[in-house]
Amino acid sequence: MLTKLFSFISFLILALTLKAESKDHSNSNQFFIQTSELNSTFLPSFMTPLKTESNVIENVKYAEIRITAQSKGERTLHFNGTAFYEIKIWVVENDTISSVLHYGSNIKKYPEKRNEGIKIPLSFEASETKRIYYTIYDLGVIFNDSFSLEDNDKLERIIRSEIAIKTICRSILGLFLFIGLCLGYFLRKKVLLYYVIFSFTGLLYTESQFGIILHHSPSYFHIKLVQFLTLQLYFYFYIFFYYSLLFNSKGVNRKFIKSIKVYFSLMPIVFLAYALIPEYLTNISNTYLIFGHISFLLTYLFIGFLLIRGIYLKLPIAKATLFIFLVNLFVVFLPAIFSQFNLFPNYKISHFIFYCLFAFDSIYYIVIMLYKYYKLRQERKTLLMKYNSLQRDYSLALMEGQETEKNRIGRELHDHIGGNLAMIDKMDNIIQNDSNAILSDTIVSLEDMIKSLSPNAKKRNHFTEELGQLFIKYSKSYFNLHVTLNISTLNSPFVQSQLLRISQELLINAVKHSHAENVYFDYQFNPFTNSLNLYYKDDGIGFIPELEKDGVGLKNMRYRVEKVNGIMKVESNENGVQIDFINIQLNNTTEKTTT
C-alpha cells in the first residue's frame, strides 16, 4: 500500500513536469513562434561572432526567435535560465533594434530577480512580427536557454505559484531534515547523518540554480562556483548515503569505497583551482566539465551497482530504494543532461519540479529508513526470542540429560551390583570362599561402574573374554549353562557393553525367577548385515509377559537392545522362557541420546 502511494505521488510529479514542459512553445493561436539556430558566418550585422574554443560541450550559441501576432496584445518573453557566463539579447521591431539586454558573470550584471529568469515585455499590433536574437557564451557549461511566451498576468500567477510551492517544499525539507537530525542524535545511526548532509547539499544546489542563493547573491558573486561545489558535494554524499542505507557501511568490497574516496579527495583541489584560476581558460573549463561529468557518471554507476547487489542479496529495502533512484534519474536528471546533447527536447522543466522532487525524496527516504529500523528491531526481537527459546531448550536438555544419566546409573547398579547380590541370596549352600569372591567381584564391578561414568572411559577388554568371565561367575548356580558363541570380531565398546549387560540380566533373571535346570545362550553373527542375533532359552517355570512387562529387568533389556537398533521378542510358557534379540547392529559406535 505504501509503495503504491509513493508511486502515485511520483507519477504526479512526472505529470506536473510534462505539463510544465508542454507550455514552452504552446500558446494561444493568436501568436505564431518560430525558432532557428544561426550559423556564425551568417549573422546579422549587429551580432559579432565570438571567438570559439574547443570545449567539451558546445559553448557558443546564436539563435533567432520570430513571433508573429494574429491580433493586438501584450506578452512577455520569458527565458528560464539566468546563470550564464554571458548572454546578450536583441529585440528587433520593424528592422530596428528596440532594446538590448546583456547579462552574465562575465560582465557582473543580472536581472533584478535572477531566480525568476529573464523577462522581456513585448507589445504587438495585429499581424506584427518581432524578431529576438540572442547569443549565449557559457564556457562549455550546460546552460538552459528554454523560453516561453506568456500573458503578463498569467506569468505573474505562474511565478507566484512557483514561489508558494517552493516555500512549501522548503518547509517540508526543513521539517524532515530536522527529523533526520533528531533521529540521528537519538538512534546514533550514520545513515541519518548522510541523509541530512545529502539532502542539504541537494537543496543548496537547487537554491543556487533557481532559488534564494541565486536571487540574493551579488552580481560579482561567482554563482557557477557555488553550483559546482554543491553539486559535487551532493554526488559525494549521495553515494555514501546509499551505501549506508543499503549495507550499513558494510557488505561491499572496501576497494570500491577506497576508490570513491580517492577520487573525491581531489575535490578540494578542484574547488581551489575553480576559485583561483580564471574560468575562461579553455583547458581549465574543460577540466571542470570532465571532472563534473565523471562525478555524475561515477555516482550513478556506483549507486546502480549498490542497488543491483542489494537486490541480489534480497535486502528488504533494495527495491524501494531502486524505485526512488529511478524516479530521480528519469524525471529530472537524465532529461536535463540529455537535452544538452540534443538527445532530449530542450523544453522547460519548471523550477518548482526540483523542489517537489527533493521534498518527496526527503519524505520517502525517512520512511525507508524508519521501515528499515523497524525491520531491524523486529529481526532483533525475533532473534532474541529464538535465543531465549534455545536457552530454554538447552536447560531442558541439561535436565533431561541428568535424568538420563540417573536412569543409566540405576540400570548399571541393577545389572552389576543387584545381580551379584541376588546370586548370593539364591545360592543357599554356597561356601564361604565363593561368597567372598562374589563380594570382591561386586566391589570391583562397583569401581568399574564409577570409572565408566568418566567421559574418557570408552575402551573395553575383549568381548569374548569378558563374556567368559561372566559365565564362569554364574556357572556355580543350580542350572547348567550351554553357550554357543559365533562371533568373529566386535569392535564397538558400546555394543559390547550392551550385550554384556543384556547377558548379565538374563543370568540374573534365571537365578532369581526361572528355577531352570538348563540355560542356553546362542550368539550368531550375520556377516551379510553386519549384525548379531542373541537367542536365550531356559527350561524353567516361565512367567506371564503381560504381568512382568513393567519389570526393571525386562525394561532394561528392551532399552539396551533398542539402543543398538535391535528388536526383543519374548515368549514364555510353563515349559520355560525364550527371548530373542534380533538384528543387533555392530556398527554402533556411540550411544544415542534418548531417554
Image: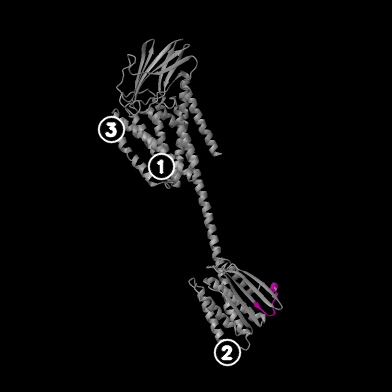
Q: Which residue is mark 2?
A: 432
Horizontal side of residue 97 vs 519, given as left or right: left
Amino acid type, label 3: Leu
Amino acid type, label 1: Phe
Q: Which residue is mark 3?
A: 276
For mark 2, give the secondary structure: helix
Instruction: Give the camera-side residue of 314 and 29.
Output: 314
Residue 171 visible in this rendered orientation of the protein: no
User: Which percent across, then down, holds residue 146?
Assistant: 42, 23
Q: Which residues are magenta?
A: 537-546
Classify 206 as above or below 22. below
User: Which percent across, then down, holds residue 252?
Assistant: 42, 46
Horizontal side of residue 447 vs 482, given as left or right: left
Q: Are marks 3 and 2 in contact (CB under 8 Å)?
A: no
In the rendered image, residue 33 lying in the magenta stretch gets the answer no
Quadrant location of the C terminus in the rendered image: bottom right
Q: Which residue is mark 1?
A: 240
In the rendered image, residue 539 lying in the magenta stretch gets the answer yes
Quadrant location of the N terminus in the rendered image: top right
Disc 1 to disc 2, how far (Cα)? 92 Å
Near mark 1 (Cα within 10 A), the count class, few <14, some 14-19 or many ≥20, is many
For mark 3, give the secondary structure: helix
Q: What predominant SS class does the magenta segment belong to? A: loop
**Dot 1 or dot 2, earlier in sequence:** 1
**Dot 1 or dot 3, earlier in sequence:** 1
Residue 96 visible in this rendered orientation of the protein: yes
